Image (tube, grey):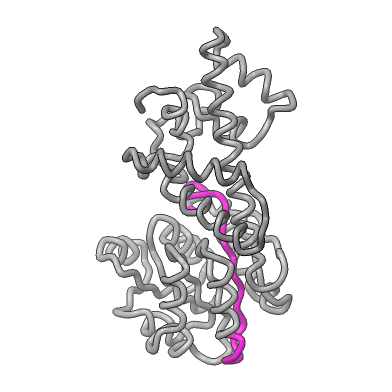
Amino acid sequence: MARIGFIGLGNMGLPMARNLLAAGHAVTGYDLGTRAREAAAAAGITIRPSVGDAVRDAETVLTMLPEGRHVRGVYLDQEGILARVPSGALLIDCSTIDVDSARAVAAAATARGMAMVDAPVSGGVAGAAAASLTFMVGGPEAAFTRAEPVLRAMGKAVVHAGAAGAGQAAKICNNMMLGIQMISVCEAMVLARRLGLAPEKLFEIAAKASGQCWSLTSYCPVPGPVPTSPANRGYQPGFAAAMMLKDLRLAQEAAQSVGAATPLGAEAYQLYALFNAQGNEGLDFSAIIHMIGGTSV
């Protein structure tokens, strides 16, 4: 059993922390939101009044935060994690952020003699609840070896992607592919319907043909073919459109920083920006099929 400090107990962080509790770890935590703190306390997590207090006795610290600026602040502030965590603690950031922020925080941790990995996740809220997340991990081999047993309590796959920041690079690239693929599936479904081909028939055929992809066979954007997809529950988010837009923005910023051409990624970013601007940021990202098809959700 490890003493774990968990910072960021929102939609993703709370079910992840619950799984750590279920695995026998002692979890203390903190979140800025009152409701998040109350929900975490009800789940059995010991809530502390600040970030520093939540990590002061921790052997391992996990963070799940919205953006790079939040991660930098939580780790680097005068009363933040690096200032308060015990010497020798393992630091695991599961946020999806820009590569530069991940590397900057890792460098600061290394300078203080601490082991740190960036470990963004794939699998959404459902994966967090089911402990079936995929972790893409960046950092030194020794730090990865320490982090792997903790991460396996929350996920089905833990992959060492490389040095610090490599986990973020993997997540950004993966979700750029996901956004592009979802748009392609939505366009094909809309076209099929207008050509008189039932979406269920296109699914049956494409799922066994060269058009097959995860966005079709596991997350189909039309109701019916995949009963567990958000399309069958009014597009309540497993992965919100706002989060897809964030990840596509990170991909475009990363592409610009290294001079990589990503024209389809850029177009996907523009389409999701428009979809979010229409007030759909709280819907699942697959609901973009309605904007593409000119229908209402």
Q: Is residue 117 magenta?
A: yes
Which quadrant is the C terminus positioned in? top left
The residue nearer to you, when weighing 242 against 161, is: 242
Residue at point 61% right, 86% down? 110
- Image-quadrant location for residue 201: top right
Q: Is residue 121 magenta?
A: yes
Vertical arrangement, residue 188 with respect to residue 260, above or below: above
Residue at point 52% right, 53% down? 247
Q: Determine whether, in the image, residue 151 is placed left or right of residue 281.
A: right
- Image-quadrant location for residue 112: bottom right
Vertical arrangement, residue 144 with respect to residue 203, above or below: below
Residue at point 50% right, 64% down? 95
Which quadrant is the N terminus positioned in? bottom right
- Residue 292: x and y, percent? 46, 27
Residue at point 47% right, 29% down? 289
The magenta segment is: 109-128
- Residue 45: x and y, percent? 38, 69
The residue nearer to you, when weighing 247 against 232, is: 247
Task: Name the residue furthest top.
Answer: 196
